[in-house]
Amino acid sequence: MAMAIRVFLLLLLFLSSSNLTFSLYEDQVGLMDWHQQYIGKVKHAVFHTQKAGRKRVVVSTEENVVASLDLRHGEIFWRHVLGTNDAIDQIDIALGKYVIALSSEGSILRAWNLPDGQMVWESFLPGSKPSKALLSIPANLKVNKDNVILTYSNGCLHAVSSIDGEVLWKKELATEGIEVQQLVHPLGSDIIYAVGFVGSSQFDVYQINAKNGELLKHDSAAFSSGFSGEMSLVSSDTLVALDATRSILVPINFRDGEITIHQAHVSDLFEDSSATAVILPSKLTGMVALKISSIIVFIKVADEGKLEVVDKIDHAAAVSDGILFSEDQQAFGLVQHVGSKIHLTVKLGHDWSSDLLKESFEMDHQRGLVHKVFINNYIRTDRSYGFRALIVMEDHSLLLLQQGAVVWSREDGLASIIDVATSELPVKNDGVSVAKVEHNLFEWLKGHILKLKGTLMLASPEDVAAIQRIRLKSSEKSKMTRDHNGFRKLLIVLTKAGKLCALHTGDGRIVWSLLLHSLHKSEACESPTGLNVYQWQVPHHHVMDENPSILVVGRCGLSPDAPGILSIVDTYTGKELNSLGPVHSIVQIIPLPFTDPTEQRLHLLIDADRRAHLYPRTPEAIGIFQREFANIYWYSVEADSGIIRGHVLKSNCILEVADEYCFETKDLWSIVFPSESEKIIATVTRKLNEVVHTQAKVIADQEVMYKYVSKNLLFVATVAPKAIGEIGSVTPEESWLVVYLIDTVTGRILHRMTHHGSQGPVHAVFSENWVVYHYFNLRAHRYEMSVIEIYDQSRADNKDVWKLVLGKHNLTSPISSYSRPEIITKSQSYFFTHSVNTIAVTSTAKGITSKQLLIGTIGDQVLALDKRFLDPRRSINPTQAEREEGIIPLTDSFPIIPQSYVTHALKVEGLRGIVTVPTKLESTTLIFSYGVDLYFTRLAPSKTYDSLTEDFSYALLLITIVALVVAIFVTWVLSERKELQEKWR
Amino acid sequence: MRAKKLRFSHSDLFFLCICFSLLVSSPSLAFQSDELLADDEEFGLEGGRSPPDLDLSIPTRFSPPPSQPTTRAHTTRKRSSDPDSDSKVQLSLEHAFGDSSDFSPAGTFTARLKTWSHGGQTLTKLRFSRNSFTKTEEQEFKKLLEADDFYRIRVPSDVLSPPGRDYIISSVKARCLPRDGLDEHFVIHMDGVNILAVNYGSPGACPYPRQLKLPAKWSFNSHTVLKNSEVAPRTLSFAEEILGGENVEGEEGVKPLERPFWAKYWMYLIPLGLIVMNAITQAMNMPEEQAAGQSAAQPQAAIPRGQGGTAVRRR
């Protein structure tokens, strides 16, 4: 018996100790977290297939990533994410082993080792004035046995050694006034031609000695009609330009220092006389590709500037650059859309009629149009030439086509997420299938047969893989139904390409994806951009049978007064239910805390003329809205002019067409920051859906402090206009940071505080009754974090129990913003080691669990920091009572424990945002962080106090209980027997 | 600081006396106003510690001569002969009733503009004179009360060159103001000579289901507070305190923590308690058993038998 108790106690002890561990064990990685690596939309691709065991392609992307991908599987060998303002201009491969990238408008040239991605060298190429950035790596140009890289950037021509990145010579060309468009190096010669325009109507050629940068010859020719600035090189001495009106093609020959300019009207070549042409950037030999209205025209350029139309393509299509695939044969690729299929054609450069390759592929229409194509040749097993094509689609995905099949595809649109919303999964019993994931009976049988095979050791490797897949799919975490704890959800993400993807929180797979039709480029909407995603309908209770839906808000163009686009998407099926647009402009979207009988949330959209538009446009919504008409307030921040205004609704719009869903507004209050001393750099509010569990805080000496919990608080940070630049650009004396807490109903400034000698960038998070912000302290030369907590004094006298008993308290009376608030604020600052990308805070279902701050550090990791460290009541020597309350003695900086990194060993490259979602289990919160990479995990800020850990051994518990029961019986029987024996004695 | 406070409280007293005498002497109570007399040093001391509480509103009542001109915003800067270069500054308060009406003058703030040696300028000694409502304004205000609409005020954002970049607007539900008279409370947030914001409202609570209540007297009872920015508490630098902290910790290590008696000895006390309880129950049972033993000899008989058993085994 005693033994059993001891075992039980030991077990308890073991359990409690295992619960206390906060960080992960190595083998727990990947159990509840997932990490996906992306690169973004590919801009350039360079294939490297010669003599390499592992075929690879080097790409640069719009997310400023240089990556080396496996051509067989599309995996990333290595990847470098450059900074946000270090855009890549060109990439190439030098010496067959170095990846060369020119970035930051040509001012930085870097080389990485191709096999492993180690940086070899880095050079800064200064220049006098910004210009086009060009990179050219001539094949056989050697200066002192050193292969040369030629770059033109910032008005300077540089020859850089490819071995160590040393600048061999430098030639300033911008002083001559030329805008260099192309660098030409004819094969086998020592002369470099820099061609370009001077002004708008002069064409110039500079001949430069490649050995030492000496200027050999300078020729120029004037062209009276002027140039549009575009040009395409057709051969080493011929190029085609466009005149200023884009209606005349200008072939230019510059052989041996003689410039001959010809002219050909586009209308002569092509019937449509009014059309204007655009030169496509594809580099073809002896040919130029033009885009005239929506038709692509290929024009052959013969000697003496004779032009000849070869073909016209009126489908949406993309053209690759020409490649040299055998001794002297050129080929280029052409991808066309025909119906739901795409056709890949590889043509010989000089012979249009013959096709080297013609293949067609079935293409998911959710990927949209082909944007870019890169082709590469290889030698087949039968010694003939084969071609593969890398295509970039409208949704930024990357696909490799070879031998009539899509070899691999990468969803790189997920590298540019704009906004995230979450959706619950269907409830289990009603069997709603989400995008046909639940398999039918036949599949079920097949699965079981497979499993049987597996257990009988009869399975082939493919079968084993299939079994593993089924197991993963049927494992608890990746099911397509709602779970008891609320861990399984759908993350609906909107990407820059205008595509919605639903990611499963269990394993991060894409459940459905939708290229939004309304965010598609059309005549009505030239450059649509997605803005935000909002919860439109979250059904529960009486409308359980409806599917939840989300509202996607977009805009035609970048300016805030561009017409808006609205789209409602079902989150279970991924179908667009309804789309509106282009409608009025959208400046601000306010989700109201009201829902109509079908649980559709009311939204108020503010346009550029400060009119408010109500959605959904139903009579029920108007009915609900009219009831709350007088109680709707909002604010707008004009960061440029430094004014914050409060607004209220006035009456229906006075328009030509009566619109009962449109309302005029009026200004209620305004705060004008003095423009010479303050500039708004950050505004933060509380999350709308945040739950606060307790309004009071019991402090050490049995006192109660009431939190000032208001949904209408706005945190504003302003800095001195001089200090808007980078850190260190101003002295501490002329820079300051002012923080404000503003009630957005009345415009009352509740708190105002100046940090002298501090500057931005400011990152802040607002939750419950506190705000935490991060900034730079110039005096201390360190980053700082400050906390402000707000407490309500007007309810402080409710502590009297008798008042509570007699009902003389004011706890239940409604709180009005028009009452003069009696608040006290407490504040404290601490040093913080890291600079910060973004700050978020954990959120749980009921708000009982203590909070953790999630800090996206500059190292692209997410750090979880307990809110207890940011408590203004901390002091150097807390009293005994305060210690018992859990107040940590004051230190000047935070302890950063390596185990508190939520992302453990991983990095979320280019981290931009952190989203926290509460689960049904109070202790737990879901965290989704996104940037170029995606990372998802589950976090329990106060440990999982309301559930057993996943690795809890129920068997051991059962065995123990059974053993105990057995032991009780055995001992009972034994004692009975003994007693009987005793009695018989 | 204390000495200065005292001095000013004297002046306050003096001023109060004057006001009181004015109050007593003038029979017509057409207008009442409060003013703030603020310490010069309390505002705009850059880098200095912020005063503990800026809410030093001292309501005083006086009635201005009825012939006071209700002029629009005119800033008069009278260069005084004072070497500290103080000058008077006036800014007008304007009000509007509802959406339709335009802003019209409602009162004047007067303050002294103090120029500091380092070039900064601050306002001190803010006084406010409120114009009383005219009959039409009274009617308009009554309409606002009935409709539960907003009463709006505005001031220029720049004191020296009104209206500055824009007017500062503030509003309040009209039903929040009437009490005995019309109670209003201004908090003016300043930054040098710029006004950032005016928080306008009732001085106390304005409970939500706002009741329609007409004021007994159509006269204003105004409170004004001038507020400048507080300076954030400096982050503690522990450079020299680390050593001290260690010392403290060392001392703590030497001196064991004072724990209550119960926390210290609970492991002894619980068994002791159990034993005591056991003993008590034993003692309680004893008399019972004795009583029972007398009636039935069986248990008592069992003991000798047991003893006998052991005796047998021993043998």
Image: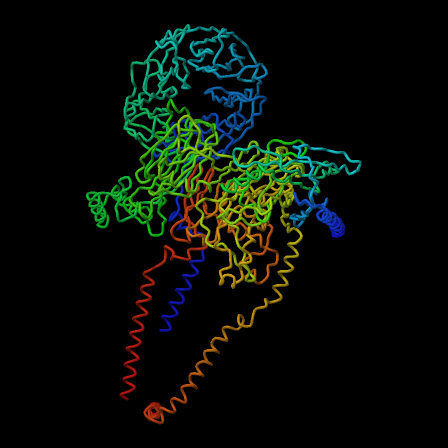
User: Which x, y percent locates residue B250?
Assistant: 63, 61
As drawn, the residue found furthest toward the front would be: B27
Residue depicted at x 48% and y 43%: A861
Residue depicted at x 51% and y 15%: A194
Residue depicted at x 36% and y 14%: A298
For the question of whether residue A472 can be seen, the reply is: no
Q: Nearer the viewer, residue B153 or A850?
A: B153
Q: Which of A155 and A303 is in front in this view?
A: A155
Residue depicted at x 35% and y 9%: A271
The quarter of the image holding the N terminus of chain A is bottom left
**Is residue A240 shown above or below A335?**
above
User: Which x, y percent locates residue B63?
Assistant: 69, 44
Quadrant of residue A780 within the rendered picture: top right
Q: Nearer the viewer, residue A35 or B85?
A: B85
User: Which x, y percent locates residue A533?
Assistant: 40, 37
Give the total of numbered labels: 0
Colouring of the image? rainbow
Quadrant of residue A391 within the rendered picture: top left
For the question of whether residue B113 can be seen, the reply is: yes
User: Which x, y percent locates residue A408?
Assistant: 33, 33
The quarter of the image holding the C terminus of chain A is bottom left
